[in-house]
Image (cartoon, rainbow, N blue to C red):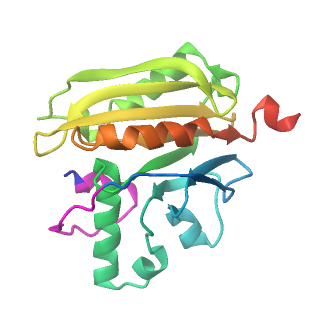
């Protein structure tokens, strides 16, 4: 697996050896609304899924941007992690790593400050290049990795706004194949990146749920949400 990205993405300065039996990805059934970030968007998640927002745990309330948000089929106990308990921290880092590679069903979302040319009406050419360049910095495309397919973007509607779907194929540090599948959308203030970064062995069984969830996404900035 590729745990260094999970640790770095959540601002953890501890390097932990992860030796554990992978948690099998779970099949998802019915969906239920998630309104925890309704000022920015709404979507529906499989019943029983949880949302890990480290920024909200640290500040006590959700922010517009901040550390990645993780949507997971297994509860991630952020408060226990923040208590300083080593076992709790190791468990959270393991879960984050398993969500990333796809051993645990789920996906991640980055929220970054939007740049010029990014809005609900779409991304201009420069903004598209900026996002593609950003996707190309993922470790799966880095030095000593094999880029099997460079990230490429398709323009489509995402949550009622004009967005992008970006796909690419690289490799994990182990040499195993890894996939990048990202829905990008912006409200003019924030760039939202909903990300599936699974290993080849897990990607097919998580893709359907990811697409089902993304089909329910409704951005607060979308014209349909304001009508």
Q: Residue at x 28, y 82 (%)?
A: 87
Q: Is residue 53 left or right of residue 98?
A: right
In which image quadrant can residue 66 be found? bottom right
Relative vertical location of residue 175 with respect to residue 61 in this rendering, above or below? above
Estimate the x, y position of residue 182 in percent, counting from the top left: 44, 34
Looking at the picture, tell me which residue is in the foreground, 163 or 200: 200
In which image quadrant can residue 86 be found? bottom left
* Whether residue 114 is visible: no
Relative vertical location of residue 84 with respect to residue 208 in this rendering, above or below? below
Q: Residue furthest front?
A: 29
Q: Residue at x 55, y 46 (%)?
A: 111
In which image quadrant can residue 151 be found? top left
Q: Quadrant of the C terminus?
A: top right
Looking at the picture, tell me which residue is in the foreground, 217 or 60: 217
Magenta stretch: helix, strand or loop mostly: loop
Q: Magenta stretch containing residue 12, yes or no?
A: yes
Q: Magenta stretch containing residue 210, yes or no?
A: no
Q: Residue at x 74, y 51 (%)?
A: 39
Relative vertical location of residue 6 with respect to residue 209 in this rendering, above or below? below
Q: Is residue 2 left or right of residue 118?
A: left
Estimate the x, y position of residue 35 in percent, counting from the top left: 69, 56
Estimate the x, y position of residue 38 in percent, counting from the top left: 72, 52
Estimate the x, y position of residue 192 in percent, counting from the top left: 56, 40
User: Magenta span covers which residues?
Assistant: 3-24
* Whether residue 133 is visible: yes
Q: Residue at x 62, y 24 (%)?
A: 157
Relative vertical location of residue 59 with respect to residue 85 in this rendering, above or below? above
């Amino acid at each position: 697996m590729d745990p260094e990205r999970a640790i770095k993405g959540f601002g953890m300065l501890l390097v932990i050896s992860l030796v554990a039996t992978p948690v099998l990805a779970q099949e998802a059934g019915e969906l239920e609304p998630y309104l925890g970030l309704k000022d920015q968007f709404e979507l529906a998640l499989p019943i029983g899924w949880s949302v890990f927002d480290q920024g909200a745990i640290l500040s006590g309330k959700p922010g517009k941007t901040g550390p990645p948000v993780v949507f997971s089929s297994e509860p991630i106990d952020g408060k226990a992690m923040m208590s300083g308990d080593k076992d709790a921290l190791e468990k959270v880092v393991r879960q984050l790593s398993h969500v990333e590679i796809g051993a645990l069903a789920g996906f991640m979302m980055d929220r970054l400050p939007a740049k010029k040319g990014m809005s609900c009406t779409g991304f201009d050419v420069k903004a598209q290049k900026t996002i593609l360049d950003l996707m190309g910095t993922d470790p799966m495309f880095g030095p000593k990795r094999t880029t099997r397919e460079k990230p490429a973007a398709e323009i489509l509607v995402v949550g009622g706004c004009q967005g992008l779907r970006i796909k690419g194929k690289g490799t994990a540090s182990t040499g195993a194949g890894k996939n990048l599948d990202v829905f990008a959308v912006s409200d003019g203030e924030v760039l939202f990146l909903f990300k599936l970064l699974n290993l080849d062995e897990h990607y097919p069984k998580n893709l359907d749920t990811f697409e089902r969830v993304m089909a329910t996404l409704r951005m607060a900035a979308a014209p349909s949400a304001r009508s």
